[in-house]
Structure formats: C-alpha cells, structure tokens
Amino acid sequence: MVIGLILGIKISPISVLIALPIMLLVTFWLGKHWMVIASFMGNLEGFGAIQTFRELASFFPKRALFPLKGGSLPPWLTNVAVLNPLTYALTHFATSC
C-alpha cells in the first residue's frame, strides 16, 4: 500500500476496509490447504515441489495475466478460471480501488 501511494495510486480507506476481509479469507483458504498437504509430506523438498506446482496451476488461469472476456484465453481455460476462487478475489481487488 505504501508503494502504491509513492507511485501515485489513489487508495481510499473504504477500499482498504472492503479488501481486508477478502484478503483474510483467501489467506485462510490457502493456508488451510497447505497445512493439510504439509501434514502428509515426509520432507520439505517434496512439499516445495508440490507448492510450486499448485501455485503456478492456480496463477495462470485467473485474470492476473489475461482477461476472462475478450477471447484471449481458450474456452477450456476460461472454464477453469471460472472455477478458481482466486479469480474472484482478484476481480474484487481490481474493481474496488
């Protein structure tokens, strides 16, 4: 937030208050999944590999790089992005500021 203010991005206190609960929900949701996966792992290296694979798989099919509408994604990847909860969190952050 401080970097955004330095760069001249206008951030209202209302948008921060709206975004905070969404950030907490996403944090708890991801943390819950990683704790379950980590409890079954035998070593730290295997957990790191699975975490990298899962994060990349959830990063690309959301609107961080490509918009969902406009035909820039193939139809099957658009369907995957619609099922990804992080797509909705990112949409909320993009529209609330």
Image (spheres, rainbow, N blue to C red):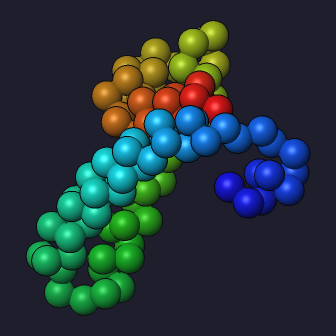
In percent of width and height, residue 45 lies at 35, 85
Q: Nearer the viewer, residue 60 or 12?
A: 12
Dividing the picture into quadrants, the one containing residue 88 is top left
In percent of width and height, residue 44 lies at 31, 87
- Regarding residue 62, the answer to whether it shows in the image is no
Q: Residue furthest front?
A: 13
- Regarding residue 35, the answer to whether it shows in the image is yes
Work out which quarter of the rendered image holds the C terminus and state it. top right
Dividing the picture into quadrants, the one containing residue 85 is top left
Work out which quarter of the rendered image holds the N terminus and state it. bottom right
Quick check: 13 above or below 70?
below
Quick check: 94 above or below 55?
above
State left or right for residue 90 relative to residue 23: right
State left or right for residue 28 relative to residue 64: left
Residue at horizontal 45 percent and vertical 47 percent from the top: 20
In percent of width and height, residue 5 lies at 80, 52
Q: Residue furthest bottom?
A: 43
In percent of width and height, residue 34 lies at 26, 66
Count every numbered label the image shows and give the total: 0
State left or right for residue 66 relative to residue 93: right
Q: Nearer the viewer, residue 5 or 41?
A: 5
Q: Residue furthest top?
A: 70
Residue at horizontal 15 percent and vertical 67 percent from the top: 36
Quick check: 58 above or below 87?
below
